[in-house]
Image (cartoon, rainbow, N blue to C red):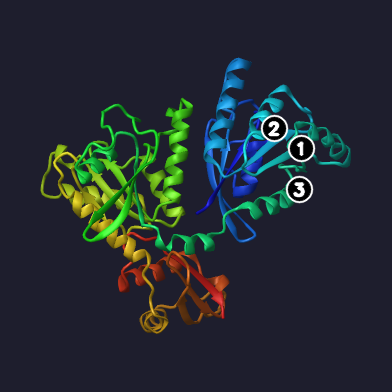
Amino acid sequence: MNSIVAIVGRPNVGKSTFFNRLVQRREAIVDSVSGVTRDRHYGKSDWNGKEFSVIDTGGYAIGSDDIFEEEIRKQVNLAIDEADIIVFVVDVEDGITPMDTEVAKLLRKIKKPIFLAVNKVDNAMRANDAVEFYNLGLGDYYTISSINGSGTGELLDAISEKVNDKEEDLEGSADELPRFAVVGRPNAGKSSFINALIGEDRNIVTNIAGTTRDSIDTKYNRFGFDFNLVDTAGIRKKSKVKEDLEFYSVMRAIRSIEYSDVILLMIDATRGFEGQDEKIFWLAEKNRKGIVILVNKWDLIEKETNTMKKFQQEILRKVEPFTDIPVLFISALTKQRIYKAIETAVEVFENRKNRIKTSQLNDAMLEIVKSYPPPAIKGKYIKIKYCMQLPTATPQFVFFCNLPQYVKDPYKRFVENKLRERFNFSGVPITIYFRQK
């Protein structure tokens, strides 16, 4: 399982800039107005071949100092509960502030790995000033400058040593049951769906959005197949994440996506496939999970001849280029197609484990790439000689050729589509690499 690294600290110490370094893109808005990061930002980082998730618990509180302190305290406590590793960022220019002392007091009580990062250290003078942070009682610190990146390498080396290794996890999870997570925006009907399957009111269903605060696991057997069903808290639009409980549930949903094998993304037919649904979809895709889209409350929709087809096309248009995805129209209320939904999830789970023999793969694919080679660039012709599936947990393929640097995305998509036509990877993200032989 991926480890979750949470970045905590007072506002304006440079958490977002540090977060951007880790995920290598300008995602959090960086601005020197206090409390600009309204978003609990989430990204993936990869260092020394270890992948982990990073959550930036941005300065939320706007208003008086005491509200501020209360908010920061909440964030730190949430990070302590949910994250595996904590990076506590302080600012060398300000020295130790009372708020830093408070946060350190909370962190000293826990057993998780904590890294103290003293930010804005961009010269030797400031490196000397950093010594005072020993007084926080958190042991050694790392001096960094998240603006120019100095020192972040050593810190990341240290963090990556504490990150869970994927390989161990794969072996460890061989005997564990596959996990299917039911995710979606609040009120899409996730709990009703699970109750309809289990036939008991295991989760309290009310029509107030956001009742399910935690992910709930239910062991389930269907079609002679055992698995865990995970009901996650509804993922909210960011503007709605007002109280810390909501942040908690978003963090939980992220975590349940990471810890599951297949994601059942439930959308509300009366509202259509909205921006928030897309975000959840790409979160699952980014984590390389199997995906099934369930359109719930289909019983409430006025239907004409092509309603279903149009609805499906509309969804798939929004998730291009990854359109090889089962879309099912269900009703948790009338139990319409709910068992079909689980049957499909089981199929997607099996597709994700699909291993194709190298000889079979080459027979099918080399013929195609010979007939439709990548376009020549600057008079150079690309010849693909051989391909194989990598021994990874999710389907990844490598194609060996003479000039891999000239193979562009449209051709990769062409190859992926042909792979999907020949072999069954419905609902499963595929990664394709082109390498020098």
Instruction: Tell me which amino acid carries mark 2.
Output: Val
- Regarding residue 12, the answer to whether it shows in the image is no
Gap in Å between the C-alphas at discs 3 and 2?
A: 16 Å
Gap in Å between the C-alphas at discs 2 and 1?
A: 8 Å
Gap in Å between the C-alphas at discs 3 and 1?
A: 10 Å
Residue of label 1: 120
Image disc number at residue 356: none
In this rendered view, identify the residue nearer to me: 421 or 42: 42
Element under label 1? loop
Disc 1 crowd rating (10 Å Cα; few below 14, some 14-19, many 20+) is many
Instruction: Tell me which amino acid carries mark 3.
Output: Gly
Horizontal placement of 399 versus 197: left or right?
Answer: right
Check whether the beta carbons of the residues at disc 3 and disc 2 lie within 8 A of each other.
no
Instruction: Tell me which amino acid carries mark 1.
Output: Lys
Residue of label 2: 13
Residue of label 3: 151
- Regarding residue 418, the answer to whether it shows in the image is yes
